[in-house]
Amino acid sequence: MSIIIQHVSYIHPDRQTLFNNISFTVNKSQKAALVGNNGSGKSTLLRIIAGRLEASAGEIMCSNTPYYVPQHFGQYNELTIAGALNISDKIKALHAILKGDATEDNFNYLNDDWDIEERALAAMQAWGIDYLSLWQSMDTLSGGEKTKVFLAGINIHSPEIILFDEPSNHLDKSSRKQLYNLIETSTATILIVSHDRTLLNMLETTYELGKNGITQYGGNYDFYRQQRNEALNAMQEQIDEKNKKLRIARKTAREVEERKQKQDARGQKKKEKEGTPRIMMKTLKDKAEGSSSKLKDKHAEKIESIADDLKEIREKMPDNNELKLNLGSPSLHKGKILATAKTINFKYTEHNLWNDALDFQIISGDRVIISGNNGSGKSTLLNVILGKLEPTEGCIDRAEFNYIYVDQEYSMIDNKLTVFEQVEQYNSRHLLEHELKTLLHRFLFPKETWDKTCDMLSGGEKMKLVFCCLMVSNKTPDVLALDEPTNNLDIQSMDIITSAVRNYQGTILLISHDQYFASDIGIGKHINL
């Protein structure tokens, strides 16, 4: 055995059930994907398996302690790198022993792991972050650097079970290749939550978490989508067939009823004409009504049976709602110079962030991607272009323009507000309450989520909520600045948002390691750091 999940359920503190009675097994050395729509509970389930969250019901059995690579790093910000990797006590004990403090506690902490520091430094070097100190605070690192810290932990601990939650989110191109190689060559049992199509296609098994529980597909992501679409089409055919039968049954019931009424009317007239005694007329009438009632019941039963079958099939249908998104067109004309940078650089300490000073120009209508390795200052440059930061060297001339900045932390979202309150806050179009609720439905936020606080939303749900807020605002931005916008989106939502951004007529400033997305939205200009 490796990972066994038996009848696991999770209920939010607000009593909303996220998933119920989940059971599946990941066998030893198996490499599996866990997919599903945003908000289905993938990350929550992974945290439960990792022992970071307690299930509401059910049992988790792992043959070894899983190693967990998280999607979000906020809880680690107050720790050092060594602390986040759970090796700080060992290294401190090692140093103490080497200095002569050979206490029993120190030997217990070290547990004969004499090369722990050497392995840690080698692991950090392997992931290209050896310029960082083990005692450096995690909150000083970029998203990519934090991810690499936890990936380095795999080299250090050599775990037999690894749980990955969106591991490629913040990684640059070369680091993604390194991640793919690690997964491909690993003998560990691996369960991965990811939207990265390249990564998902490397895995041999796909588990889909949805409203009907867990469904297993024996193949990679492309195979899963093919099988899912075939199943969806088959179920849709069943629905169409049942709808057809239901229409026919209802029509038949109406026609039979109408014929019966006409026959009864003709019979009544005939009997009256023939002078049938009144007492006999009543007996015949009762028999006719009884016969008619039986006929009605028969057709009603048939209609009810078909309707029940139809309901059952529809309940089994996977969630297939489509997020509809139209960002509109800005008023700013194309061709206007928005920003001109002349030999700019930026420094947080005494060292410049970029080896070479930057010169570039951004014109209205441009689609610009800012590229570079992790820690190269992509987000910093984006903030400089937007005027949120000023360069420490050189100068940048900016025209007046309005922008929307969607950052990696979804700072537009107030975690204390409910979903409905968040959207209402951006309602500068003065939409009525029922219009806002209709819009939330279109963005895949059903009624039961409206009173949920935003801090309970998944990363993908927060991204969709950001775009929903943009939709209720009355002004289309001149510039749309996106910092890793596809990081936490499920494939379905990603396709819809890709289409919306592609159709947006304004200026796009993009930071993304998702080459599919960059290509699909028509990036035409590059700033390489």
Image (cartoon, rainbow, N blue to C red):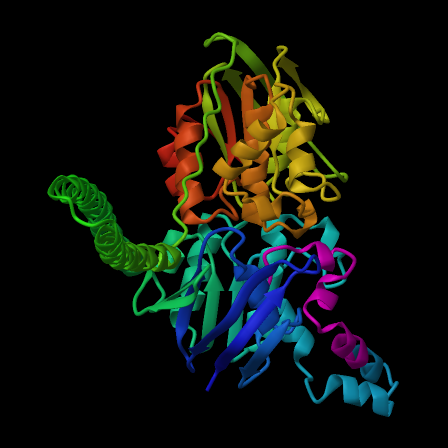
Viewport quadrant of the C terminus: top right
Q: Residue furthest bottom?
A: 104
User: Residue 72: x percent and y percent?
Assistant: 63, 55
Q: Is residue 311 left or right of residue 210?
A: left
Residue 132, quarter of picture: bottom right
User: Residue 58: x percent and y percent?
Assistant: 58, 78
> In the picture shown, does residue 380 fall above or below 103?
above
Of residues 487 and 168, the one drawn nearer to the viewer in this rendering: 487
Residue 73: in magenta span: yes
> In the picture shown, does residue 447 fall above or below 306?
above
User: Residue 485: x percent and y percent?
Assistant: 52, 39
Q: Residue at x 57, y 80 (%)?
A: 59
Q: Is residue 179 left or right of residue 351?
A: left
Q: Residue at x 11, y 43 (%)?
A: 274
User: Residue 142: x percent and y percent?
Assistant: 64, 48
> In the picture shown, does residue 194 fall above or below 371?
below
Q: Is residue 233 visible?
A: no
Q: Is residue 57 visible?
A: yes
Q: Residue at x 57, y 73 (%)?
A: 49
Q: Residue at x 24, y 49 (%)?
A: 278
Q: Is residue 230 left or right of residue 263?
A: right
Residue 412, quarter of picture: top right
Total marks shown come to 0
Residue 80: in magenta span: yes
Residue 518, quarter of picture: top left
Numbered range of the magenta stretch? 69-94
